[in-house]
Amino acid sequence: MDYREAQEYERGYLLDLYAPIRMPMVIVRGEGATLWDSEGKQYLDFVSGGRAVTGVGHCHPRVTAAIREQAGKLLHVSNDFYTEPQLLLARRLSELFSGRCFFCNSGAEANEAAIKLARKYGYKTAGEHKHEIVSALKSFHGRTLASLAATGQPKYHEGFRPLPEGFVHVPFNDVAALREAVGENTCAVMLEPILGESGVYPATEEYLKAARELCAKYGAALIFDEVQTGLGRTGKWFAYQHYGVEPDVITLAKGLGGGVPIGAMLAREPVAGAFQPGDHASTFGGSALPAAAALATLEAIEEEGLIENAARVGGLLAERLESLRGRYGLITEVRARGMMIGIDLAKPVALRVKEECLRRGLVIITVGDQMLRLLPPLVLTEEQAEQGLNILEQALGQVDGE
């Protein structure tokens, strides 16, 4: 199937949701940091399958082997039954975070679970008035109604009001505004340690420490949305580890399954104890197949040194991008933490840069019309990093000269 035929299928059979951002190719194969389209053209993938999903690379041998083996034994039974992959995965994640797990299918679902848990915790500890959730402007927590209400970007709210009540948004990294917003009615503060969809903006240590202090003061849960930042992407297992601030709840998805849909919410006591049987559930949450894939993904990250690789190669990317900033007036700022990089441009030409990169065999994504975002897989080699940056430099030069 070629691109034009794919467009016809989309117009005929799919809701019109993705057409504006579709790239002009049909992807048929992936391996590591490389993709191939239906025409046989090869691309270097600097977005990990879209948005930080295939962190261990496309079709990682450990993950594909685990999927094949599990598919031959058991695909799914509901949570009326125990399955070994789910239990082993819960143990491994709990070893990493020291909390208890709830499994689901996506980041939005993980954040929904965290929101419900926080509300239930507030209700049990203080009553119905303790229901407000404070989150940040420019945040992104998902597209279900409650996670959308937590998202501090009004553009995503248009057409879907009335949204669930009880959500308060404050400017990111504004400690004074956070102190003013959190109080006796607050059941949770929900933050991304690094704003992802808005363009890779790290929190300050002061901001996250203030959030921890305020949650302790008012008996609220501190929730860190690590859907995009977790599992090695920033050069540590979790982004919050860069700050020395411990949350009560974290949410995970994207890179957890190595490309297979799975999400997780992990909670520590006493917050975890607020949920009781029947309070929440998921038909497919932690099913045998995605759990097996996630276990293999975690093994690959740990045993192959991918977190260290993300820190090292991500540092090289950031250093080289800073040198490009010095040479090209088109780049005004570079923000980087491991394999999570935002690049601000002086002119509204992000789409043109993306197009030129794609034409030359590099996949990147944009944020608005003046920002580029890079989310390479954790398996990216130094050679591939140099290859990708050479292409980006060529694209910048082309666009800057137009």
Image: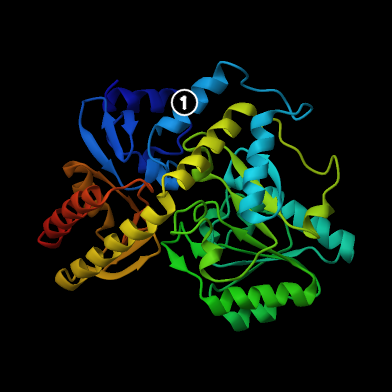
Relative image position of residue 135 (x, y in whole percent) = 62, 66
Q: Residue 273, percent across and down? A: 83, 53
Q: Is residue 230 visible?
A: yes
Q: In this view, does 64 lie to the left or right of 22?
A: right
Q: Can residue 339 be seen in this view?
A: no
Question: Residue 171 in the image: x percent, y percent?
Answer: 55, 74
The residue depicted at 9 percent of the width and 61 percent of the height is 401
Nearer to the camera, 398 or 216: 216
**Residue 262, position as x, y percentages in the image:** 58, 38
User: Mark 1 highlights which residue?
Assistant: 65
Q: Nearer the viewer, residue 268 or 27?
A: 268
Q: Which secondary structure, mark 1? A: helix
- How is this picture coloured? rainbow
Would residue 172 appear left or right of 45 to someone viewing this image? right
Relative horizontal placement of residue 400, taking residue 150 as reference (left or right): left
Say which residue appears at 61% left-offset and 70% top-offset: 245
Question: What's under tag 1, amino acid-wise?
Answer: Ala
**Is residue 399 rendered to the left or right of residue 67?**
left
Q: Residue furthest left?
A: 401
